[in-house]
Amino acid sequence: MASNRFLKTSLASLSLVSIGAVSALVGTQIPSNQFQPPAIAQLSNRSSNDENFVSNAVDRTGPSVVRINATRERVTSRGEQVQRGTGSGFILRSNGTIVTNAHVVSGANRVTVTLKDGREYTGRVLGADRQNDVAVVKIEANNLPAVTLGNSSQLRPGEWAIAIGNPLGLDNTVTVGIVSGTERSASAFGLRSSQPFIQTDAAINPGNSGGPLLNQSGEVIGINTAIIRGAQGIGFAIPINRATQIANQLTAQAGV
């Protein structure tokens, strides 16, 4: 309770500071000969032929992002219960090897994978590492568009971050932000994993789990995994270097 009161007090303080800053700005007069609108200043230094790197990154990796529907059935004293959930994933290898979060598929009786072009496949869970929240799913397909991997060990705060996934069933949703931090402890959002996480302010919502976090070149740098409820712009992703290491181990254990 004390922490909640502190959070509410902090948020109220932030609102007051913002309002105060606006009031001070309104009350300040700027000589007209010293003022240039920011938009005009930026446009004067940019070429009209600049490419949109976000669109380019999405064009490069978007076809590799999939929707994963998981169905869990169990029999209880009250009868049969069916739970359905939706997450995201991405094609790691063109032979149908897909990476997602363990919590997306763990305990599922049926897994369905839908590609961006609408093709639908039954997925087989090769393995899931619940502690690190990484899972591998296999579909019977070949010549699929696989992602290009980046190097998460070289990330720096302030770099661009692009998230693609299926939040709330809205397939192939794109959000953009930055890498807010690296080497974040999992204890910040309740996981017991010892691995560090990437923090980002790219919007992540339910259904984004398992989808890729990209750099400005469209290379995968992480797997979107968690958010802090009640906060704004605080999301976490598993660094791709660690995630692919785990995925390779799970695939080898499955004999694939």
Image (cartoon, rainbow, N blue to C red):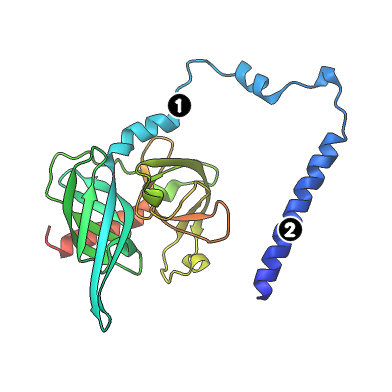
Disc 1 designates what residue?
A: 52
User: Where in the figure is residue 61, as x and y percent of width and height?
Assistant: 32, 38
User: Where in the figure is residue 229, as x and y percent of width and height?
Assistant: 53, 61
Looking at the image, the residue that sits furthest to the bottom is 77
Could one spot residue 223 in this view of the protein?
no
Q: Is residue 56 above or below residue 123?
A: above
Disc 2 designates what residue?
A: 12
Q: Secondary structure at mark 2?
A: helix
Occupied quadrant, residue 124: bottom left
Is residue 240 or residue 49 the one in the foreground? 49
- Residue in the picture at 16% in, 54% down: 122
Left or right position of 231 against 57: right
Left or right position of 203 against 254: right
The numbered mark at residue 226 is: none
Is residue 54 or residue 171 the one in the foreground? 171
Q: CA distance from mark 2 to mark 1?
A: 37 Å
Occupied quadrant, residue 8: bottom right
- In the rendered view of the protein, which quadrant contains the C terminus? bottom left
Circles 2 and 1: CB atoms closer than 8 Å: no
Could one spot residue 60 in this view of the protein?
yes
- In the rendered view of the protein, which quadrant contains the N terminus? bottom right
- Residue in the picture at 37% in, 37% down: 218
Residue type of the residue flagged with mark 2: Ala
Q: Secondary structure at mark 1?
A: loop
- Residue in the picture at 11% in, 61% down: 255
Q: Residues within 10 Å of mark 1 (few under 14, many from 20)?
A: few
Occupied quadrant, residue 219: top left
Residue type of the residue flagged with mark 1: Asn
User: Where in the figure is residue 142, as x and y percent of width and height?
Assistant: 12, 42
- Residue in the picture at 70% in, 68% down: 6
